[in-house]
Image (cartoon, rainbow, N blue to C red):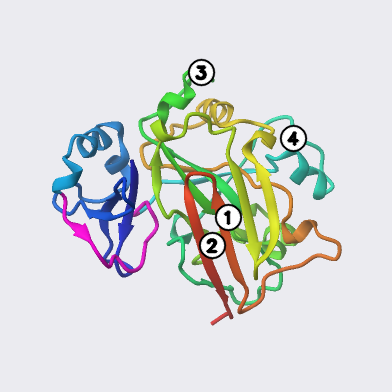
Amino acid sequence: MKLLRFGAKGQEKPGLLDAEGQVRDLTGHVPDFAGDGVSFAALHRVRALDVESLPVVNSPGRLGACLGRVPTFHCIGLNYARHAAETGGKPPPEPILFSKAASALSGPNDDVPLPRGSEKADWEVELGVVIGREALYVSEAEALDYVAGYCVVNDVSEREFQIERKGQWIKGKSAPGFGPVGPWLVTADEVPDPQKLALSLSVNGETMQSSNTSDMIFGVAHIISYMSRFMRLVPGDIIATGTPEGVGMGMKPQRFLRAGDVMELSVEGLGTQRQTVLAAE
């Protein structure tokens, strides 16, 4: 299934994309796709519906984030071999864990406003993993059994805030609009192997990132198992699994986002995003 949310900000309704590419309204069948709303039990109830009986939404308008909210917006750093190389770093011996503020969550095509003082905003196409049931101390062999689905994530980052300022990365990752997610939550049964997905990102029509999740240093199953040693993952948690090479920070000379720039990004089978960068308010 391809699950989505449509409507104005703060007024989104749950829906799904049918086999013909039409949006079907799930209002009255599910409250929202968030928390327990993306648990395996909730997804089973949606799967049991007669899709053809659901109302067609002829003009869905804006697509919101495919998750209404997230308990935790987890992220993995330096998780592609060629990306680690372009930053001048060595491949990490263990997954690098950090997070974005949950308030960074935004729609796949929403504008991305630069935060005040930003000079080094950067792009990062990523595979997002959404958890469908509680995971604690799970083995790598069973880890994918905890995945509700997958989605496209743009882990927008302000590098000066992230790296040149003191402290943890979260303050460079969490400005409003820095977490575009969607357009769809694609359930795990439609993604046979998350380590065989092409992903790409362009800025103003110029390809910046073009890679494959096979270049991940730590695969999705390893990441989930590893994280579950240190914390309880819960339904609705999202994990942005790292970005491939081609970020602005890695270029020579470096290149960063400016007002008016347009980012377009996609992950194979999971849809496409498009965001326009706005000047700081």
The N terminus sits in image quarter:
top left
- Residue 173 is covered by the magenta coloring: no
Q: Amino acid at mark 3?
A: Ser
Residue 63 drawn above or below residue 34: below
Earlier-in-chain disc, 4 versus 1:
4
- Residue 51 in the image: state x and y as whole percent: 20, 44
Q: CA distance from mark 4 to mark 1?
A: 19 Å
**What residue is disc 1 on?**
155
Q: Amino acid at mark 4?
A: Pro
Earlier-in-chain disc, 1 versus 3:
3
**What residue is disc 2 on?**
178
Please give the range of residues in magenta: 54-68
Crowd tier of the residue under label 2, counting other residues whose Cα lies within 10 Å: few below 14, some 14–19, many 20 or above: many
SS of the residue under disc 3: loop
- Residue 115 in the image: state x and y as whole percent: 58, 73
The secondary structure that most of the magenta stretch takes on is: loop
